[in-house]
Amino acid sequence: MFKRVVSHKGFWFSVVVLALVFVLLFTVIKWAIEGFDMQYFREQDPITFFGGLTAAGLIYGFFVSFGKFRARLKKSDQSS
């Protein structure tokens, strides 16, 4: 089932889109908590900050997309 899900058309696109949305929302929310101060970005190492956010976003996107596509495939298997 795993190989079938990750090779399904649109799976990886969904992972990337969810990762980008996660990174954007997480950054804006954290920045808002800090009071929209630009020091928030200057205090952190940019490679570690954005690298960590990107990795976290991809992990989040993978799990959410996997669940969505697995449910869709199971539903289509039951109906056929």
Image: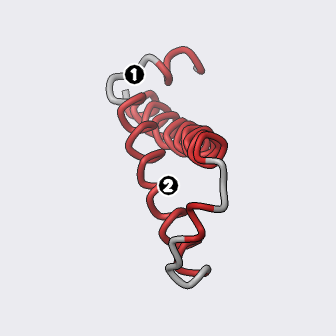
Which quadrant holds residue 2?
A: top right
Q: Amino acid at mark 1?
A: His
Residue type at mark 2 is Phe
Quadrant of res 1: top right
The residue that appears at 47% across and 64% down in the rendered structure is 25
The residue that appears at 50% across and 55% down in the rendered structure is 22
Residue under label 2: 22
Mark 2 or 1, closer to the camera? 2
Crowding near pointer 1: few (<14 within 10 Å), some, many (20+)? Answer: few
Label of residue 8 in the image: 1
Q: Residues within 10 Å of mark 2 (few under 14, many from 20)?
A: some
Give the quarter of the figure containing the C terminus: top left
**x then y, percent, for residue 32:** 53, 79
**Secondary structure found at label 2:** helix
Q: Nearer the viewer, residue 22 or 5?
A: 22
Query: Hey, which quadrant is residue 14 in on the image?
Result: top left
